Amino acid sequence: MTEPLKFSAQPKLRKPTMVIGWESDTARLGERVTDYLINSLGAQPFCEIDPVEFFPLGGVTIENDIVQFPQSTFYASREHNLVIFRSAIPRYEWHEFLNLIVDVAEEYCHVKEMYAIGGMITAAAHTAPREAWATFSSPKIKKALSPFQLSREMNFETPPGSRPTLNSYLLWVAKNRDVSASNLWIPVPFYLMTSEDPAAHKKALEFLDKRMGLGLDYSAIDATIKQQNERLKRLRISSEEIDGCIRKLENNQRLSEEEREGLVKGIDEYLRKRNN
Amino acid sequence: MGIVLRQEPELRKPDMIVGWPGIGNVGIITVETMRQALGAEELGEIEPWDFFYPNKVTIQAGIVTDMNFPGSKFYYKRMPKKDLLFFIGEEQPATRESAYAEGKRAYEMANLVLDVAQKFSCGRVFTSGAAIAITHHSAQPKVWAVANQKALLSELRSYDNTILMSEVEGKGNQGSITGLNGLLIGAAKRRGMEGICLMGEIPDYLSRMPFPYPKASKAVLGTLAKIMGVTIVHNPLEEMTVQMETVVENVYQQFPPEIRERLEQRKLVTQTKQEAITEEDEQWFKEHIDEFFNKDKGA
């Protein structure tokens, strides 16, 4: 077996923070947040996890005419003392994969804290104010994050038939290795789950910005939020059905199964189309 | 990756009985029923991390407090004649999209089970599963048997209600056992250990249904108990079988009349060659399984 961690550089960092995001997760939240950080902070790749043990490599997937290949890359920004891990979701050997992330965090980077970003599906409308929830590896990090506007008292057990998220699994691995870690959960309206939710992206970025003093420029994401809100507004004007469903959600009313399906389908199709 | 043994009792040349989930959960129900009936004590487990994705996280007041994984546990029971070891795996360590174990991890799991068997000087391992048969659910299931050594075949022939796989109509000398119930006795063969797989018959038209088929487990348990010389006094499978017969009958009544009519023939013709369900019928079952259970839920 080849060495799974491939280092291309050894960035000098001083007890940095690590942010983790997964590709194609709920509303592409982790993916977009890590992309935003990498691009706006000019973070540079320094290490990769070799995919062979963790992904099916019997072929490639194609997305929008582009060949996709599983990548699991660590980036570093020396200036902001930040490490970013962005990866496709592994398909096998999860325990080993998650331990490799913590290996890099603990043994190579000596991180102070790790934050994994994830979406939490909600029945609330996209027009409702966004919250941020957090779960923690220890009471110590929970206490350290008390000054931030986070809902910190989640009680949860995976319901029968479901499985824990990869972020929860990572939090447990970090806890067992005594690495301080937190999962950030941003509620995403269920009808934006398969598309994108830039308002949720911004909420996650705002927390990271405040926690690490990154001085992020939000103009690009604000423009995306504005554009999406306008598109959804146009869709509501053109479709009474969709407007009625969203209005019900805004009034805390439940939708029937049929209404839910119609809303998800209608919005997904609309947002996928260009120029509307 | 490893084995954690919480005690190391001295056992007299035990046999090991192994169960994993599979079709109708025939194997795991058989082994779990026997283990419980005999009051076997927990011995240890195989660490789950390298084999399974967790099945439950517990978060209390924001802090992750626990992560549960499917269990893979060993048990033992001292018996007057021959001591027993049990291994019960709550899931098969599937590495691809299959429900059954295959590949490197499955082989590793099989070898860890056999490491424990050999540590306690176990000479024989039994696995148990389902045999998809051209039969009717009203019929008493037989137990199909295979061994990993030719010398064991005459013994298998002497078991009650048991037939060798080669004796099953239409099977000829070919067959296969999917997943760890087969792989384990294959791996045992490599180590020179005796291995036997006992499979309870499940009708082909029920093999895709997402419910247990305790009638087959009961048949395997009966055979296994006789082999081990044990009596299972309070057998919960009796009650479970009665309950599931009602469920099976309800599902059966929802089959289209023409399919049911063909299947009814199996009750009448017991001596001549039975006919398997047609490809068309099988397709119909695949497409309608969910509907049976949605109706049940509504009721």
Image (cartoon, grey):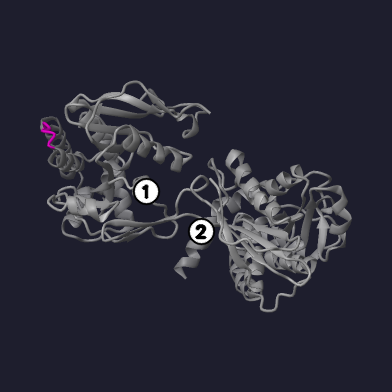
Residue range (magenta): A213-218
Give the left or right position of residue B186, taking residue A159 as reference.
right
Q: Is residue A241 visible?
A: yes
Q: Residue furthest top?
A: A8
User: Which residue is more in the foreground, A160 or B290?
Assistant: A160
Callout 1: SS: loop
**In percent of the image, x 62 and y 48: which residue is there?**
B112
Q: Name the residue under label 1.
A: A165
Q: Mark 2 points at which residue?
A: B291
User: Which residue is more in the foreground, A22 or A234?
Assistant: A22
* Prevailing secondary structure class for the magenta stretch in the rendered image: loop
Callout 2: SS: helix
Q: Distance between the residues labelled 1 and 2?
A: 29 Å
User: Which residue is more in the foreground, B77 or A92?
Assistant: B77
Give the left or right position of residue B168, taking residue B71 as reference.
right
Q: What residue type is labelled 1?
A: Thr
Residue B61: image tag: none
